[in-house]
Image (cartoon, grey):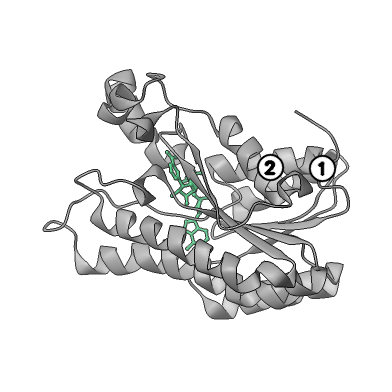
């Protein structure tokens, strides 16, 4: 799937060096976007930006801890100075913590909620003036199947991803008449560094894969096109929606 569906648009991606971030950045570049790639880890970020830039795309890389309001302010200033506009915000940065209710430590709860939930809000808050000024903008927030149904574990992660789902819907309503669409994407089990350890240990016997009707993990390049759809004008009447990409996991 290649075309120029993001031709000329400026897209900011958080968590860009992660599994889903890299696949999304590469697809967006092929679709003609000008990219602002951000992540908390700088080395891999600059390698990614260099690789995508070598393909002819306009790319800027900037360190961004999404849980820091100050760093969001700095990145938005960078975008304004460099591009004067922002058309697409993809909030992909995320961390996971697996314990359930009683075993979750308070510090881990705070860290997960700070990155996944507060980071998504901070990003929309910081970027919204530029997105509104674009007049035709899209925000894609990353929830999960674990933002839709309970798993009996990952208490902090589930709470944060459930919050991202509703935060996206209320933002969609708030900005619907200001030229900014907001949607959430809900991946199932996807083979990325986030869950690589589980997949290495358990392979296809991993219980969530066993519960997935397609009986396999998804690939990052199967999520990126869903993010592209929500980011580009193909979804011009889609806002406040949740796009589930899970091999059928939540269908039963
Ligand atoms: N892989 C899956 O099965 C799966 C399923 C559902 C949802 N998701 C969600 O998709 C998103 C991307 O995950 P992934 O699978 O690519 O994982 P990943 O671990 O490969 O990537 C996550 C990225 O976020 C970055 N990050 C972590 N903390 C950060 C912070 N404070 N500020 C900025 N960046 C930070 C990491 O450096 C990393 O590059 C996450 O929000 C995750 O919760 C993943």
Label 1: which residue? 5
Q: Going 81% across and 40% down the picture, which residue do you hit?
A: 31
Give the quadrant of the C terminus.
top left
User: Can residue 10 be seen?
Assistant: yes
Q: Is mark 2 within 8 Å of ligand 1?
A: no
| CB under 8 Å between discs 2 and 1 | no
The secondary element bearing badge 2 is classed as helix
10 Å neighbourhood of mark 1: few (<14), some, or many (≥20)?
Answer: some
Number of on-image labels: 2
- Point out residue 202 in the picture as x, y percentages from the top left corner: 28, 24
Give the quadrant of the N terminus.
top right
Label 2: which residue? 229
Precedes in sequence: disc 2 or disc 1: 1
Among the 4 quarters of the image, the one containing residue 94:
bottom left
Q: Going 24% across and 55% down the picture, which residue do you hit?
A: 155
* Image position of 58 (left or right of 51): right
* Image position of 131 (left or right of 218): right
Q: Work out how far the residue at label 2 is from the one at label 1, CA to CA, in angstroms.
A: 9 Å
Q: Nearer the viewer, residue 40 or 191?
A: 191
Q: Nearer the viewer, residue 15 or 136?
A: 136
The secondary element bearing badge 1 is classed as loop
Q: Nearer the viewer, residue 91 or 250?
A: 250
User: Can residue 37 be seen?
Assistant: no
Q: Going 84% across and 69% down the picture, which residue do you hit?
A: 82
* Image position of 72 (left or right of 190): right
Q: Nearer the viewer, residue 41 or 231?
A: 231
């Amino acid at each position: 799937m290649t075309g120029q569906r993001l031709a000329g648009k400026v897209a900011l991606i958080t968590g860009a060096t992660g599994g889903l971030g890299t696949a999304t950045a590469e697809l967006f570049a092929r679709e003609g976007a000008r990219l602002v790639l951000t992540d908390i880890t700088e080395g891999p970020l600059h390698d990614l930006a260099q690789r995508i830039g070598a393909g002819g795309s306009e790319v800027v890389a900037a360190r961004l801890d999404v849980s820091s309001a100050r760093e969001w302010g700095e990145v938005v200033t960078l975008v304004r100075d460099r591009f004067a506009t922002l058309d697409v915000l993809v909030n992909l940065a995320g961390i996971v913590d697996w314990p359930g209710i009683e075993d979750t430590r308070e510090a881990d709860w705070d860290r997960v909620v700070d990155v996944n939930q507060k980071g998504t809000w901070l990003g929309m808050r910081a970027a919204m003036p530029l997105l509104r000024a674009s007049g035709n903008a899209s925000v894609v927030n990353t929830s999960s199947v674990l933002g839709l149904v309970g798993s009996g574990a990952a208490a902090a992660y589930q709470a944060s991803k459930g919050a991202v789902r509703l935060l996206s819907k209320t933002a969609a309503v708030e900005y619907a008449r200001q030229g900014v669409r907001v949607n959430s994407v809900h991946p199932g089990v996807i083979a990325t560094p986030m869950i690589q350890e589980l997949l290495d240990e358990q392979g296809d016997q991993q219980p969530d894969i066993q519960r997935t009707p397609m009986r396999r993990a998804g690939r990052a390049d199967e999520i990126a096109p869903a993010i592209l759809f929500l980011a580009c004008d193909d979804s011009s009447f889609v806002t406040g929606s949740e796009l589930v990409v899970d091999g059928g996991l939540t269908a039963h």
